[in-house]
Amino acid sequence: MNLNEFAYKLGVLGTVIILLWVGFFKFTAVEAGAIKELVENHFAMGWMYKVMSVQQVSNLIGIFEVLTGIGLLASLFLRRIGFYAGFASAVIFVTTLSFLVTTPGVFKMVEGFPVTDFFILKDIPYLAISLMVFVNGKE
């Protein structure tokens, strides 16, 4: 295995760990409450609270994240699955990054410097990995 293959697999495994970890955490009341402000202010997701409870919305998101993580892991063995799992994870990370513009008050000034919830910014490299998996799954 060359360094490029190793780096790719490491990136995919890191993304899998994050999706599984965060996905399973969505089944807790703490995380369901923590994501509520983000989700309810999102143009494509806010409607869910009209038909489901806070915990049910979080559970649904968690299921999607866990299944996507499993799909990314499977893509290391069955390349074609990467087309679908890469697309699904890209949707997750684009959506998460869009919270930066859909959530009121997400940017704050600290000593004259704009800051945000930096945990969202971690999704930029995860989006890159997702797109690589998606492209590899097409080949």
Image (tube, rainbow, N blue to C red):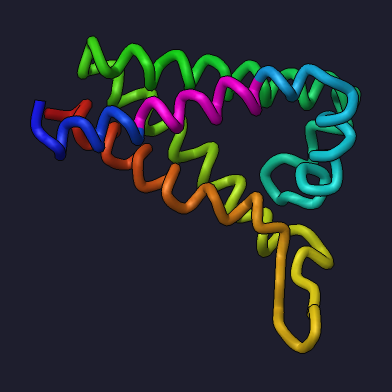
Locate the N terminus by quadrant: top left
Q: Quadrant location of the C terminus?
A: top left
Work out which residue is located at the far bottom of the displayed protein and give it. Answer: 112
Magenta run includes residue 6: no
| Residue located 35% across and 35% down the image | 11
At 72% from the left edge and 40% from the top edge, which residue is drawn?
Answer: 45
Q: Nearer the viewer, residue 25 or 36?
A: 25
Tell me if residue 21 comes above or below residue 120 in the rendering: above
Q: Tell me residue 86's x, y (percent).
A: 36, 31
Q: Nearer the viewer, residue 125 or 83?
A: 125
Choose top left, top right, bottom left or bottom right for residue 74. Answer: top left
* Left or right side of 55 for 26: left
Magenta range: 12-23
The magenta stretch spans residue 20: yes
Query: Is residue 90 toward the left or the right of residue 96 in the image?
Result: left
Instruction: Check the image and report above or below for 64 versus 44.
Output: above
Predominant secondary structure, magenta span: helix
Which percent across, then down, holds residue 18? Answer: 55, 30
Q: Residue at x 36, y 47 (%)?
A: 128
Q: Position of residue 116 (x, y in %)?
A: 71, 65
In the image, 104: left or right of 99?
Answer: right
Horizontal side of 4 relative to 112 (left or right) equals left
Q: How many marks?
A: 0
**Measured along the vertical axis of the image, is residue 38 above or below residue 72?**
below
- Location of residue 79 by image quarter: top left
The percent coordinates of residue 117 (x first, y second) are 72, 58
Tell me the residue at 73%/50% (across/down): 42
